[in-house]
Amino acid sequence: MKTSVQQALDVIQRENNEPICAYIYDLAGMQEQVRGMLQTMPWNTKLFYAIKANPDPRIIEALLPLVKGFEVASIGELLKVRAVSQEVPILFGGPGKKESELKLAIEHNVSYIHVESLLELRRIIAIAKERGQQKPEVRVLLRINLRSNTLPRTKIVMGGGPSPFGIDEESVDEAIELIRVEGAGAVRLCGFHFHSLSNNMDARLHAEMIELYLQKVERWQQQYNLQVDFVNAGGGFGVTYDGSPGFDWSLFTTLLQQSEARNRLATRGGELFFESGRLLVADHGYYATEVTDIKRSHGQMFVILRGGTHHHRLPASWGHNHPFHIVYTDRWEHEFTRPEVRGERAHIVGELCTPKDRMYSDAEIDCLRVGDVIVFEKSGAYAWTISHHDFLGHPHPAFHYLMEGDEHVNVNATFQSANC
């Protein structure tokens, strides 16, 4: 059946007489974007999907034929991937891996474990030795926290200073020695992992950061006589929510093509990994929620939604106004006046009993009525799964998926052409 975001809202309304509250994921749009990204990447670079951005099984299924594999940060995430595919490559990260998780990760045949500390490395070595010599070596990448103040600065920084993430650069030699002496025959060092920041918008600085990573690895190769098969440069590719330019993937991959350090890695047979989450899915998710009340309080207008931050926590956690469009409806079955706001500013808030449940402050509203639907765009990443779903016990939203082969429409144009 041909569908669209607008048609999906119609289906949701027919299936449930309650006010609309739903996530709509454009799986075809995600696939199209990833195909475009892959076309510009140098031949020795590989793209993984970091499912922490959105671990919905349907998204994993949609990206499975396209990406090299998946990056997970827990056993729960790992099992979600393995429920979709038993063979796809998996990178297993996270700063607080328990011994039971490490054992399960090895049993479920993860491709590489990102080692975050010397203690974690010792645990992996012990587990690998317990498995016996008949088992294949456990393959690891050392996650390194560089001592550098040249990294781009974003709201979320995981490296270049004090951090729970990774092994300090000063301890690289100790980690390598541990593998060579205690882990011989049980653990194999395949390369290095870096992930220094999140949501970076500057493609040129990001490329310079990758160059720094590769130069560091080259020095360690020479210093410790290493064979480095893989360098995982992490993710951190940014998405904007205020209409400003986001991450320029085309410029980034052009600079990668020109990178001498990447070319040297390729000449030695090495591959460069990226584990992107937000950039792959953010633009292809929509959170649609119906207006249930509009009222004035102390001179200010408030638009109250069926949903809120318990479904979509990103605007509250990041402190931003989340972009939206309005879908106008004719549903109004009452004889009394339909509340509305016209030509003024209003705060768009959720249904929770807390003033922190706010999606947008001082939104400029041309026309909005109770029963209309607000669709928050860029809701494909870090929205549903980071939220406190069960606070106050409100029903969860519905989930709808737009598949490849469905009729595609210009979502923005559809919303903008609606009338109030």
Image (cartoon, grey):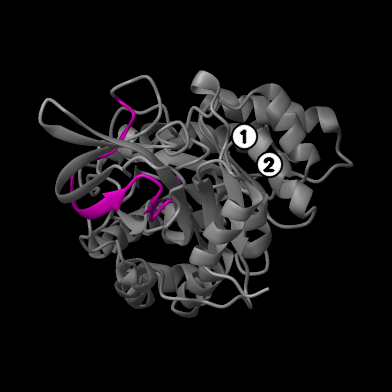
Which residue is most to the right? 134
User: Which quadrant is the N terminus positioned in?
Assistant: bottom right
In x, y percent, where is residue 122?
63, 25
Q: Nearer the viewer, residue 346 or 121?
A: 346
Taking the spot 47% from the left edge, 67% from the top edge, the residue there is 265
Q: Is 375 left, or right, of 155 in this rendering? A: right
Q: Work out how far the residue at label 2 is from the one at label 1, CA to CA, in angstroms.
A: 6 Å
The label shown at residue 74 is 1
Q: Where does residue 138 sit, x and y in percent of width and height?
A: 72, 42
Residue found 69% across the figure and 23% down from its top: 99
**Is 416 placed left or right of 414 in the picture?**
left
Name the residue carrying label 2. 78
The residue that appears at 26% across and 46% down in the rendered structure is: 340
Q: Position of residue 211 (x, y in %)?
A: 33, 61
Q: Is residue 62 left or right of residue 46?
A: right
Q: Nearer the viewer, residue 95 or 339?
A: 339
Task: Name the amino acid type tagged 2.
Answer: Leu
Identify which residue, 268 or 157, lies in the foreground. 157
- Mark 1 belongs to which amino acid? Ser
Q: SS at mark 1?
A: loop
Give the residues drawn in magenta, as a range. Answer: 356-382
Report x, y in % for residue 76.
67, 35
Q: Is residue 175 visible?
A: yes
Residue 151's disc is none
Q: Secondary structure at mark 2?
A: helix
Badge 2: residue crowd in 10 Å (few <14, some 14–19, many ≥20)? many
Query: Can you tell which quarter of the image residue 172 is in?
Result: top left
